[in-house]
Amino acid sequence: MKKLSAVGLALSVALFTSHVGVAQAQDALRIGILTDMAGQFSHESGQGSVTAVKMAVEDFGGKVLGLPIEVLVADHQNKNEVAVAKAREWYDVQKVDLIANLINSAIALSVANIAREKGRIAIVNGSGSSRLTNDGCTPNSIHYAYDTYALANGTGKALIKEGFNSWYFLTADYAFGHALEGDTATVVKANKGTVVGTVRYPIDTPDHSSFLLQAQASKAKVVAVAGSGTVFINAVKSAKAFGLTQGGQTLAGLLVWDTDVHAMGLELAQGLVLTSAFYWDRDEGTRAFSKRFYEKMKRMPHMGDAGDYSSTMHYLKAVQAAGTRDAKAVMAKMREMPINDFFAKGGRIREDGRMVHDMYVYEVKKPSESKAPWDYLKLRATIPADEAYRPLSESKCPLVKK
């Protein structure tokens, strides 16, 4: 009898635990923001990403399908093992429906695969590697704001057209840097330019001296920094100190955020050519959103912040329209619904997970051209959506039918 009682008790506990798990899964829709809160990429994501997602949730009304929307936040510390552990915990234990931001391309690629494994959703705004919608694509992930292909297509072509046809790459030694170098090198060569050489630096290096000496010695017309974060800012400062630009070489930042320009100041950043998906002062819609964001963050939003807001709102609208939080149904609805907001007009999500929209080539203003705080960029060119991203005919994504 004792054995039977023990078995009965165990079954009761198991059933109770199962019901608790189901109840927990149904009591809220959960969005997890997995980002860099304090490291070198925090000014490109971090609290700005959290603020943007929470703004979208508040603007949507705080509920969907009768369920409250909860926002969870975690710092992955730019460590892949930390990010993977947190993603699994969120999907398995916290029953998170969507993981957002995902700055750091190596981390984004890992979490996208976990989303596929767990039947949940991941939306990438912070990271840039075009592998996310190429050989690393999944049916459960979306790459929203920008990617390395679009950055290369913008900045690379713009400079080559002006006669800057020999390039040397100063590349961050991780997934994003490699992808940015590779995509830009392809654009350079396709437009009859040459790649003189490349050197890769550790993403946490405080000293670029030896790398810059190699770039200077190459005599390349363009020294392209294929990196991001505070290390990128330090590289630009060091290049100026080494007299690289004074010697006739052009420094190209292949990913430059508005916050980078702000940190460097116009005296240092002036003349940098960059490609971006968003600029706060583009039109009335961007200015309206940016004013609200500024009130909360005391800085203007960049394309990562704007993308986090826009993609969260698009996700919630898709959940509402699908009438379910089921990932497969929601992903189908997100691909079906066009995106028309302050971030993108006529945006759409392709079968490879790429959100396709116009991109913009900007130049950093001279100090004398700036009329107010955060008045940093002037438009050089608009790249139409159909030209900005890798054509599906060249895609290695297995989800693309050819």
Image: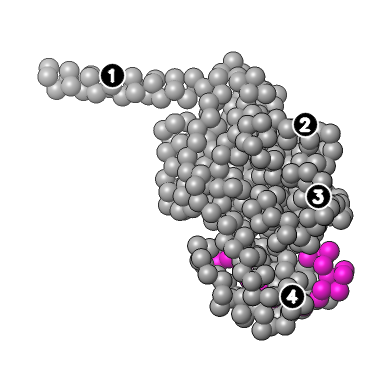
Disc 1/disc 3 C-alpha distance (Å): 69 Å
Left or right of 398 in this view: 274: right
Disc 1/disc 2 C-alpha distance (Å): 55 Å
Q: How is the image coloured?
A: one colour
Please check the rendered image and state whether residue 167 is part of the magenta-colored stretch, yes or no: yes
Disc 2/disc 4 C-alpha distance (Å): 40 Å
Q: Residue at x 51, y 65 (%)?
A: 206
314 or 331, which is in the foreground?
Answer: 314
Circle 4 crowding by C-alpha within 10 Å: few under 14, some 14–19, many from 20:
few
Q: Amino acid at mark 4?
A: Gln
In the rendered image, which residue does mark 2 sit on? Answer: 288
Q: Amino acid at mark 2?
A: Ala
Please check the rendered image and state whether residue 60 is part of the magenta-colored stretch, yes or no: no
Nearest to N terminus: mark 4 or mark 1: 1
Residue 370, label in figure: 3
In the rendered image, which residue does mark 4 sit on? Answer: 246
Q: Is residue 45 above or below residue 152?
A: above
Evaluate whether residue 72 shows in this view. yes
Q: Secondary structure at mark 1?
A: helix
Q: How many marks?
A: 4
The magenta stretch is: 155-173
